[in-house]
Image (cartoon, rainbow, N blue to C red):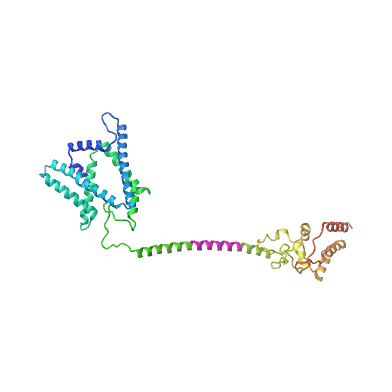
Amino acid sequence: MVLAAMAVVYINTQDTIEQGAAQLASTYTVFSLDTDSDSKSTTLAKSFANALVMVCFICALTFVIVILYKFRFMRCLIAYMVYSSAMLLGVLGGVLFDVAIEKYRLPVDTFSFLFSLYNFALVGVVAIFYQTGIPPFLTRAYLVATSVILSWQLSHFDDWTAWTLLIMLALYDLCAVLTPCGPLKALVNLMSKEDAPAMPGLLYEAQLPTTSTQPSQQQLRSISQVQTSSSARSAQASNNQQTQQTISHAESQSASYDAADATDTNLPSTYSDTSYNTDTSHPKLLPASSSETTATHSTSMSHLPTTPPPTQQRTVTIPLAIAKIYKLPLLTTTTTPAASTNDNHSSSSPSRSTATSKRKNHFSRRRHSSGVSTSPLLEQISQEEEEEEEEDDDEEDEK
């Protein structure tokens, strides 16, 4: 950049600037600028339009280069690159050197000047594209000289076109390099592949130190295996974490079920957890003494167990009145002498004891049904028998 600025400042005269501006305006610009008659807004619009046309041409030419490189038209691409570099170094470089000779009055004859230009262009093409036996610093020097000559040539635009072209080229470079669809980014991706053919001079390259070596295919495979194993370990860790969360959730549910079981164990001893009928729709009750039944009847409804888990069925003893209301199948209870003595003592009057004895005799009928457990089950009481029993109880209470 410093060399380009010095060339623009020190290798130019007023006549060369005017001549160069006229030549570039007639060759590259679409809309002619007239700063005397046009307003500033019109001049700015025309300048942006001219810069946009030039940038679009450069973009289209870059896409052509990418297509040629992608489909391996290397002879056409190399021929174009060699021709453009030779013309840039020989023709535009000759114009630059001619202006410098005229400005600083250097004594050079025509033959020497043309011979020097021919050698300068030829050595530059060989240094940029062939590079065999050429020192690296000479290749870099020719690449810098190419940039300086091109910058000096573009400096001959008028001020409006020069600044607008500079802004448009900067924006184009950002889009071409950084965007996914940019031609320069696509070109870099194509040249970074392993089977990509070498194309010197197309991109600027940096030389690695002599101690650094390119990784072999085995090293690349080992690195990919390490990355794969690390990703597999991370996936396994995430699966283990999900499994632990599932186990903790199941343990919390089992703990809640254990808490419900602990609540059930606080109820009277007539609640059973292990006895089930073969017919799962009719849970059976274990035999219990009449004293336990009386204690259960006196228990409040709030002490009844909550709904067990759907996979379990519990046998409970509930008040007789609730069983009669919902017409539940019941199991007979074997009354012991002590229990009958307690029941007789608990009677407050002969009529009450008589009604109680009638109920017990009524529910003491044993019936068996096929396909049911061997434990005696009571048949469900019909509605007529219940009404007769209630009438008998009312008559006894009135007496």
Specify start and end residues of the magenta stretch as a single range: 238-254
Q: Nearer the viewer, residue 363 or 92?
A: 92
Q: Is residue 90 visible?
A: yes
Q: Nearer the viewer, residue 289 or 47?
A: 47
Q: What secondary structure is the stretch in magenta mostly built from?
A: helix
Percent x, y of residue 241: 51, 62
Q: Residue furthest right?
A: 399
User: Which quadrant holds residue 318?
Assistant: bottom right
Percent x, y of residue 166: 28, 41
Residue placed at 50% from the left, 62% from the top? 239
Q: Nearer the viewer, residue 63 or 397?
A: 63
User: Which quadrant holds residue 315?
Assistant: bottom right
Please determine whether, in this image, residue 183 is positioned above or below residue 254.
above
Percent x, y of residue 170: 31, 44
Q: Is residue 1 visible?
A: no
Q: Is residue 43 magenta?
A: no
Please determine whether, in this image, residue 61 is positioned above or below residue 289.
above
Please determine whether, in this image, residue 44 is positioned above or below residue 110.
above
Please determine whether, in this image, residue 290 is positioned above or below residue 129.
below
Q: Residue furthest bottom?
A: 337
Percent x, y of residue 6: 20, 44
Q: Is residue 252 left or right of residue 24?
A: right
Q: Nearer the viewer, residue 367 or 291?
A: 367
